[in-house]
Image (tube, grey):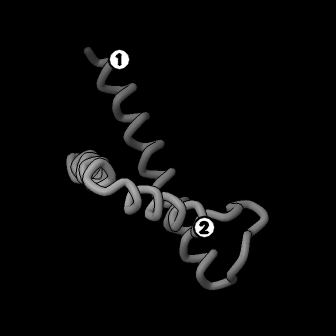
Amino acid sequence: MDVLARIKGWIGSLTEIGLMLLALAIVAGLLVGGTLPFFGGVVNNIIGLVKDLGSNGLVGLIALGVILWLFSQRKVS
């Protein structure tokens, strides 16, 4: 069981790092504008995701609810 807890901790840490990098890419993209060499078009990708979810009506709303539920279940350690 200790191995599973350790793997779960690693995955949680990697997820947190990924979310921090995503936030950094969004802020940098909004400040600089355009596509950044390392981060690419993160802001354009997020805008595309929101457009796709919005154009799908109820299915998009349900998908957004599931995504928000998954992120709300995270425990910050």
Position of 11 with respect to 71 (left or right) is right
| Location of mark 2 (residue) | 44
Residue at the bottom extreme? 31
Q: Mark 1: which amino acid?
A: Val
- Point out residue 2 in the picture as x, y percentages from the top left corner: 29, 18
Q: Mark 2: which amino acid?
A: Asn
Position of 33 with respect to 48 (left or right) is right
Position of 1 with respect to 25 (left or right) is left
Q: Are marks 1 and 2 in contact (CB under 8 Å)?
A: no
Viewer-proximal residue, 27 or 59? 59
* Residue neighbourhood size for the residue with mark 2, other residues' Cα within 10 Å, grouped as few (<14), some (14–19), many (≥20): some
Q: Residue 1 appears in which quarter of the rendering?
A: top left
Residue 73 in view of the camera: yes
Point out which mark residue 21 bears. none
Q: Earlier in the sequence, mark 1 or mark 2?
A: 1
Viewer-proximal residue, 47 or 9? 47
* Residue neighbourhood size for the residue with mark 1, other residues' Cα within 10 Å, grouped as few (<14), some (14–19), many (≥20): few
In the image, residue 28 sits, relative to residue 55, either above or below, namely: below
- Point out residue 48 in the picture as x, y percentages from the top left corner: 54, 62
| Location of mark 1 (residue) | 3
